């Protein structure tokens, strides 16, 4: 099987996600709803770790970026001004034979005749625009004036709050506003597990600047964003910075890169980094009649700032992290026989559970008490899983499968029964090398904190 489309690997990943509680189909007991997913106990931790790390490097560790959290529903005028109401659509074709609706670019052409990719039927409608926004009504009456949409991207609330945030933050250009939040698109063909969903989360930064800085900042943000993915465990060789050609780019953009990842189902987009010029603020200034200009103290000039936008998908990145982490190797089982080990090699920074704590035996009270004390010491600083059931090898294996990077075992040496010098020490096992080191309990928290930072 080619490395580019490894469906077998993808199937294993999807089944592991369900079996271990990362991702479930939404409304599963009712047959699900296409393109919608729920994150289980481990999935939600993974997702939070990703979002927290993004927020940390994009907002907290910078002087020039602040955050916001906007409403999902906005005045319809926003979507008119941004162009989404008129143009946020894919041209669609209906097959009159099998009734399937497909994107016009997916129609097959054989000997100059257009055919349905599903049934091969030739009776197709003309392409029609299909708006990707979910329409809804605000208030008691379902009439035209109360129409609005679930936001298809988070960026617009940043643009329309630009002036307010700018004034309260007392910053100078270049200056950014970051937001993480839900977005909704009525995708025609949701597919590849969570990759193309109808409800998803975005992590977006709008970085406002002077026109002359735009192109340089586009390159700067591309480099920063590539570094980000490497820092969460995605190797550079699996990432691709694709320069979007003129004909694919939005007309107002002077340059766009797609950051793509080698998924088992092919090379696909994780994030877009786009230099959007002054298009968005200009549109909102024109439509609202409110000035969105910036007054430059140095030059005493007034102008509409330009913007560079790194826009990433939370769900797509979570999927990339799981795909990247999934590995099978060999390890000894309890009886000393080699077996296949499934392991998620998450970077410790984003692993859902950081450390598992095991008493060697569950019916030896002094071991259990000590193990629980360790859990209490670690818990304020990290996610910890306590497990006392089954053979120790099996317990390690369960943690390997969910990607827990560290395992702490409390054994008889911890109690100092054999060698007093080892009293109050534990074994610390590394998930990837499976090597164990002996560590003093009092040093454990600091050592682990350093490794999961
Ligand atoms: P695509 O071409 O794959 O539809 P896009 O270019 O329309 O994506 P953008 O509008 O640039 O996507 O949105 C920014 C980011 O939001 C994307 O890079 C992606 O990570 C995420 N995203 C967009 N649509 C979806 C979706 N349907 N499901 C999950 N994530 C999405």
Image (cartoon, rainbow, N blue to C red):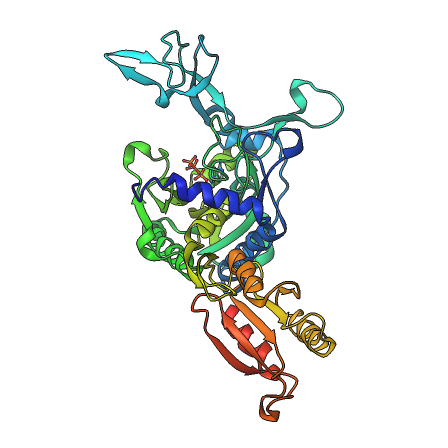
Which residue occupies the extreme left position in the image? 111
Ligand 1 rendered quadrant: top left
Vertical placement of 129 versus 287: above or below? above
Q: Residue furthest right?
A: 140
Query: x%, y% of residue 387?
Result: 65, 64
Front-most of 19 and 281? 19
Q: Is residue 337 left or right of residue 122?
A: right
The residue sitting at 37% across, 36% down in the picture is: 252
Residue at horizontal 29%, vertical 16%? 109
Residue 292 is at least partly visible in this image: no
- Height in image: 274 above or below 49? above
| Along the line of sight, the residue nearer the viewer: 23 or 221 | 23
Badge count: 0
Q: In which quadrant will I find the N terminus?
A: top left
Where residue 416 appears, as percent x and y from the top left, is: 64, 88
Q: Nearer the viewer, residue 415 or 121?
A: 415
- Residue 334 in view: yes
Q: Position of residue 22 (x, y in %)?
A: 57, 48
Residue at x-position 65% and y-position 19%: 144
Position of residue 74 in the picture relative to residue 284 (left or right):
right
Does residue 178 lie above or below 437 as drawn?
above
Side of 189 where 109 appears, left or right: left
The residue at the far bottom in this view is 420
Which residue is found at the position 52% from the left and 47% from the top?
Answer: 16
- Image coordinates of residue 45 in percent, x first then y, are 59, 55
């Amino acid at each position: 099987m080619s490395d580019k489309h490894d469906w077998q690997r993808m199937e294993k990943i999807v089944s592991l996600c369900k079996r271990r509680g990362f991702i479930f189909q939404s409304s599963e007991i009712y047959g699900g709803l296409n393109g919608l997913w729920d994150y289980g106990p481990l999935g939600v931790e993974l997702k939070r770790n990703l979002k927290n790390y993004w927020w940390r490097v994009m907002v907290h560790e910078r002087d020039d970026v602040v955050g916001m959290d906007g409403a999902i529903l906005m005045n319809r005028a926003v979507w008119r001004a941004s162009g989404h109401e008129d143009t946020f659509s894919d041209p669609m074709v209906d097959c009159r034979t099998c009734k399937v609706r497909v994107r016009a670019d997916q129609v097959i052409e054989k000997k100059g005749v257009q055919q349905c990719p599903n049934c091969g039927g030739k009776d197709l409608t003309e392409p029609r625009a299909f708006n990707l926004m979910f329409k809804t009504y605000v208030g008691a009456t379902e009439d035209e004036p109360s129409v609005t949409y679930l936001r298809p991207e988070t960026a617009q609330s940043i643009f329309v709050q630009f002036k307010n945030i700018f004034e309260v933050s007392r910053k100078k250009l270049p200056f950014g506003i970051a937001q993480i939040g839900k977005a909704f698109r009525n995708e025609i063909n949701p597919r590849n597990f969570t990759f193309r969903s109808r409800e998803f989360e975005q992590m977006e930064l709008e970085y406002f600047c002077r026109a002359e800085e735009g192109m340089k900042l586009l390159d700067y943000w591309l480099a920063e964003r590539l570094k980000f993915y490497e820092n969460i465990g995605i190797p550079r060789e699996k990432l691709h910075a694709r320069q979007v050609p003129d004909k694919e780019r939005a007309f107002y953009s002077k340059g766009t890169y797609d950051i793509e990842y080698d998924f088992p189902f092919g090379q696909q987009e994780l994030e877009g980094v786009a230099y959007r010029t002054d298009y968005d603020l200009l549109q909102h200034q024109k439509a609202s009649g409110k000035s969105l200009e910036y007054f430059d103290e140095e030059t005493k000039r007034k102008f509409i700032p330009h913007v560079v936008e790194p826009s990433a998908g939370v769900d797509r990145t979570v999927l990339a992290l799981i795909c990247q982490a999934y590995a099978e190797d060999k390890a000894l089982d309890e009886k000393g026989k080699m077996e296949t080990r499934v392991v998620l090699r998450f970077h410790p920074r984003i692993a859902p559970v950081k450390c598992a704590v095991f008493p060697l035996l569950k019916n030896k009270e002094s071991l259990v008490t000590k193990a629980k004390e360790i859990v209490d010491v670690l818990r304020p600083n990290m996610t910890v899983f306590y497990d006392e059931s089954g053979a120790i090898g099996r317990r390690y294996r369960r943690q390997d499968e969910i990607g827990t990077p560290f395992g702490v075992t409390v054994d008889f040496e911890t109690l100092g029964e054999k060698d007093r010098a080892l009293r109050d020490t534990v074994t610390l096992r590394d998930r990837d090398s499976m090597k164990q080191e002996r560590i003093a309990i009092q040093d454990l928290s600091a050592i682990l904190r350093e490794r999961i930072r």
